[in-house]
Amino acid sequence: MNNKRIHPVLFKKNKQRSSDTEERFRNGTVRLRLTREQLICAAAAAALAAASWIVTSGRSPDTGGCLERGDPGTVSREYELDVSGIGEEKRRITVRVSPREFTEEEAAEKMNRLAEEIGMHILNGNESLGNIRSPLSLKKTIAGYEGIRLSWYPSDPELISYDGEIGNAELQSAVDTVLKVSMRAGEFKETFAFPVTVCPVEIKGEEDIYAKLFNTLEKTDRSTVSDPELRLPEEIEGYRLSYSVPENNGWIGILGVGAAACILLGLKPEQDRKRKLKDRENELLMDYSEVVSKLIIYMGAGMTVRNAWIRIAELYETAAAEGRTEKRAVYEEMSITAGALEKGMPEGRAFSEFAGRCRVNCYLKLVSLLEQNRRIGDARSESAMLLEAADAFEQRKNTARRLGEEAGTKLMLPLMLSLMTVMMIVAIPAMMNLM
């Protein structure tokens, strides 16, 4: 328990201050201070509430009011109403009000006015209806006349299509035609006809001439599809045309491919040699821990380095002759070294030549340890061999991990190609169905 004493003078002052605050609350003299953020929040809430009240009061008339319709061509409006008089409680309902439709006089006035202005809405860059060279913009509705729906009926669909395309690629002179439009405003309908003159395509350069040539060839092909041959036009826009089949220069590509193949074939022996050396190096690294372990076992059994070496080589040769093992580079080199030792070659020279043929640093270290063991033969050399065996196993694990990562990297390209093939098999039929 906290036995901390309170000073009587301080307690008296605090008690007196609390009594004064209560007295000021009762007398209404204490005022709360509002921050600027609080004032802004209150003002925003009041403004939103006022806007909501204005909108709600405008859209929720009393039972004696009317519901305003939208302008012609707009969407229907929805109103929420509280209905009373049926039963004891009010019920909220939703009323959909259709947009207003034109009267007969309004529809006639709107259609006549639109007919006078129709040209400026559909020219789409053409000078006038009397000089049409590019596609028209045959719209279904016109801005400012949303309540009127338009339907277009060209008298010559090959000259002016229903979507406004112009077939003037082969015209030699202007052609007069008629473009009809049906205007509908609710139940009222009226049709207007406009004279239109379609002019030939204006030739501005070589690209336009070639475009006209392509259109002529396409139309001639369709019209003479039953003939055994397609006759090419001899003249277009005043130009005399001649045709010739381009020379087949495929032999250049064949020569290039052949030259590239010759270069690659010349590089192949060197690449094969490097690959074999790399595979041999990886094999020597993987077998290193096994060789060190066997030497430690035989040397621990009392054999000399020379006898242990020859014993390992003999066992390998016997197993290889009986087909119980495949050829391994390190044991082949050990067999050569064992043969040299049996012929009287000094151990130091034989082991040095072995390390030189292996060309891997770990075997140089092994030969150094074997030479040390052969000369000294104390406990320190045995400990060094045991440490080397542990390092050899760790090196074997690292080599196996590295080879696995390299194999995974090499598989990335085939896997990506397989993924792309599967995606094409799935996507192409889907896209063809959509088309």
Image (cartoon, rainbow, N blue to C red):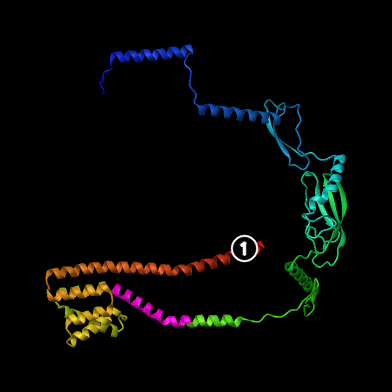
Q: Is residue 208 magenta?
A: no
- Closer to us: 275 or 6: 275
Q: How many marks?
A: 1
Left or right for 40, reference 153: left
Q: Is residue 311 visible?
A: no
Which x, y percent locates residue 17? 38, 14
Measuring 85% from the left and 61% from the top, which residue is drawn there?
A: 156
* Figure check: 272 above or below 129: below
Rendered image quadrant of residue 146: top right
Could you say whether the residue bearing mark 1 is in a helix, strand or loop?
helix
Residue range corresponding to the magenta coloring: 263-288
Residue drawn at x 62%, y 65% is 429
Inspect this view and state whether residue 38 appears: yes
Foreground pick, 323 / 390 = 390
Q: Quadrant of residue 219?
A: bottom right
Q: Is residue 282 magenta?
A: yes
Q: Quadrant of the C terminus?
A: bottom right
**Badge 1: how crowded within 10 Å, few (<14), some, or many (20+)?**
few
What percent of the width, then of the height, locates residue 212? Answer: 77, 68
Position of 125 compared to 19: left or right? right
Q: Residue at x 36, y 69 (%)?
A: 403
Reply above or below: 350 against 70.
Answer: below
- Is the stretch drawn in magenta largely helix, strand or loop? helix
Q: Quadrant of the N terminus?
A: top left
The residue at which mark 1 appears reads as 430
Q: Amino acid at mark 1?
A: Ala
Residue 372 image position (x, y, % from top left): 15, 74
